[in-house]
Amino acid sequence: MSSAGDCAPCAVVDLHLHTTASDGQYSPAEVVHKACELGLACIAITDHDTTDGIEEALRAAEATTLQVIPGVELSTDVPRSEVHVLGYFVAYKEPSFQAKLDLFRDSRLNRAQRMVAKLARMGRPLDWRRVRQIAGAATVGRPHIARAMLEKGYVSSIDEAFDRYINRNGPAYVERMKVSPLEAIQLILEADGVPVLAHPLYQNHLVPELARQGLVGLEAYSTGYTPDETRFLVELATKYGLLVTGGTDFHGEDVQPEHLLGGVMVPQAVVSRLEAYYQGRSCRGGGSCLPC
């Protein structure tokens, strides 16, 4: 892992990034290049249900001062909603960990095929080969279906594809293999990783129980959060002895234009405390880490 060394107290870091290994617009190497151009000190590659982009990102960062943290984002289910759990410093080469990720990806592929079939029955047929082509090396997901719909002129934007057809309450939505937040947390812990609740603002009611079940942190710094919302999440993390992390959920300008790489100011202390926890030390105090 490339290390940035000592950075300024408020150096920009981004611990929630997606690449073409899942549903991002840019390859892992391109994401690293863009992060370096922006002067970021640290990033985490957190693709959905896959770690396939990590090696490429680490290689791309070797000749730079950019620190790259290996990570993953797991999608889980609760009644009437989804909960995403980030895992940092995961032992991504472990066969048992990869076997479980394979199951998740197979479920995504089957789900995508069924969504395309539903759309066809609704008079919105898509060429499955084209959907696969859009996905490239990644497992087909809803963003790839949305892009195919945009190409066919069925919708005027990616957001419209989700809103009208493939969001959780949409007529073409299909459930994937159900995984609970607890199962995701345990999987990350078994891979020696650090589990963190992504997008926790509207899932904050789950924090007390998840903290008892092994959750280690909250993504308190995130795209669209106001200072008051960030402060609330930092205080919530402090209350339950959790770390705080932060990131933009970057997928690329063509996928989510409002989620800009490095677009959220995340203090470097967040990374230091995350590393300290991972290394087995007792530094877990994210509470004082407020926006600069």
Image (cartoon, rainbow, N blue to C red):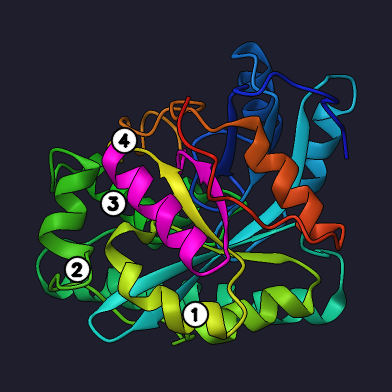
Mark 3 vs 4, N-terminal side = 3
Q: Which label is found at residue 119?
A: 2
Q: Which label is found at residue 146?
A: 3
Residue carrying label 1: 210
Q: Where is residue 82 in the image (x, y as percent from the top left)?
A: 34, 73
Mark 2 vs 4, N-terminal side = 2
User: Quick check: 63 left or right of 196?
Assistant: right
Residue type at numbered disc 3: Ala
Q: Position of residue 49 (x, y in %)?
A: 59, 66
Residue type at numbered disc 1: Leu
Q: Position of residue 90 (x, y in %)?
A: 77, 63
- Judging depth in this view, the residue of 182 and 120 nearest the camera is 182
Classify 10 Å Cα crowding around label 1: few (below 14), some (14-19), many (20 and above).
some
Asked if the residue at tag 3 contacts the one at tag 1, i.e. Cβ–Cβ closer than 8 Å, the answer is: no
What's drawn in magenta, residue-wise? 227-250
Mark 2 vs 1, N-terminal side = 2
Mark 1 vs 3, N-terminal side = 3
From the image, state whether disc 2 or disc 1 is nearer to you: 1
- Judging depth in this view, the residue of 240 and 189 nearest the camera is 240
From the image, state whether disc 1 or disc 3 is nearer to you: 1
Residue type at numbered disc 2: Leu
Q: Position of residue 170 (x, y in %)?
A: 14, 70
Residue type at numbered disc 4: Pro
From the image, state whether disc 3 or disc 2 is nearer to you: 3
Where on the picture, by quarter, is residue 281?
bottom right
Specify whether residue 197 is painted magenta: no
- Judging depth in this view, the residue of 44 and 178 nearest the camera is 44
The Cα atoms of the two marked residues, 3 and 2, are separated by 11 Å
Where on the picture, by quarter, is residue 35?
top right
Residue carrying label 4: 227
